[in-house]
Image (tube, rainbow, N blue to C red):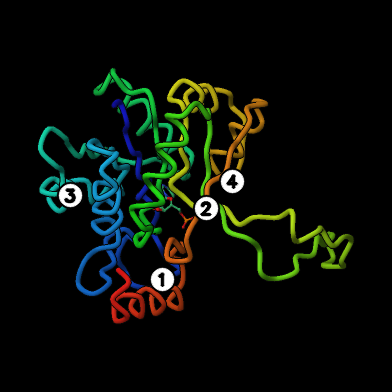
Amino acid sequence: MGVVALVPAAGRGERLGYGLPKALVPVGGVPLLVRAVRGLFASGRVRHVVIAAPVSDVDEVRAVTAPLAPAGGAVLVLAGGAERSDSVRLALVHALRELPGTTTVLVHDAARAFTPPDVVAAVVDAVEAGHEAVVPVLPVVDTVKQVDADGVVVATPDRAALRVVQTPQGFAASVLLRAHESGLLATDDAGLVERLGVRVATVPGHQDALKITTPFDLAVAEALLVGGRA
Ligand code: C5P
């Protein structure tokens, strides 16, 4: 089973206001990145993880994540790039070089530290069932407006047809490589793959897989712990 999870964790995380790279910010005493990597391994589908770390923290990230790997697996750590997409591309190239049997690649934000292992497993299973690209999604609960440059509403898309996208996003390795070599731009990996004309399938996501970006999100994460959900 040639599954590798890439974890872009090189962001500065300034919006959290912690003075630490976001991946190393603790929730309940455990860094977000450690929780995210544990969740990947706990799915039972992932034995190799490649982390793009802040350039100043490669050694520390290696030290805290190396013990998490299961028997026969490994955590590889390299320095990330200037943008998230650069970090993913660097991790992907490293993974394909170091783990040449890789057929399925997940891309999972360190910031989604509480993603349930079942979501990870569902994404891997869907890729291995033949989907070239798979994303976990949630329904949209708010009405969404499209606005122009002045903030004036120009359209109200049908909410029933909209989804919020989470990670891990899963791909056939060759498809993700093609997407990252294309020079196209998108805000997520599935967006790049869509631009190549590849069909992107969905599986159910989970509320606990929220992206921890602001102090409010951190408070929600702490509440998940208190509630025994994570
Ligand atoms: O900043 P944002 O929350 O959108 O970042 C999403 C993920 O991408 C985070 O886990 C962050 O660490 C990672 N990232 C990265 N390299 C960058 C910027 C962000 O790996 N240059």
The residue sitting at 23% across, 39% down in the picture is 77
What's the amino acid at mark 4? Answer: Thr
Characterize the local packing of mark 2: few (<14), some (14-19) or many (20 or more) Cα atoms within 10 angstroms: some
What's the amino acid at mark 1? Answer: Leu
Label 4, label 3: how far apart the Cα atoms are: 27 Å
- What label does residue 187 carry, if any? 4
SS type, badge 3: helix
- What label does residue 105 carry, if any? none
118 or 67: nearer the viewer: 118
What's the amino acid at mark 3? Answer: Thr
Label 2, label 3: how far apart the Cα atoms are: 28 Å
- What label does residue 204 carry, if any? 2
Instruction: Name which of mark 4 and mark 2 comes first in the sequence.
Output: 4
Instruction: Name which of mark 1 and mark 2 comes first in the sequence.
Output: 1
SS type, badge 1: helix
30 sits left or right of 3 in the view: left
Instruction: Name which of mark 1 and mark 4 comes first in the sequence.
Output: 1
Of circles 2 and 3, the one toward us is: 2
SS type, badge 2: strand
What's the amino acid at mark 2? Answer: Pro
Q: Tell me how many marks there are.
A: 4
Label 4, label 2: how far apart the Cα atoms are: 20 Å
Of circles 1 and 4, the one toward us is: 4
Q: Position of residue 137 (x, y in %)?
A: 56, 53
Characterize the local packing of mark 4: few (<14), some (14-19) or many (20 or more) Cα atoms within 10 angstroms: few
Q: Answer with the quarter of the image where residue 153 lies.
A: bottom right
Which residue is tagged 3? Answer: 65
SS type, badge 4: loop
Which residue is tagged 1? Answer: 16
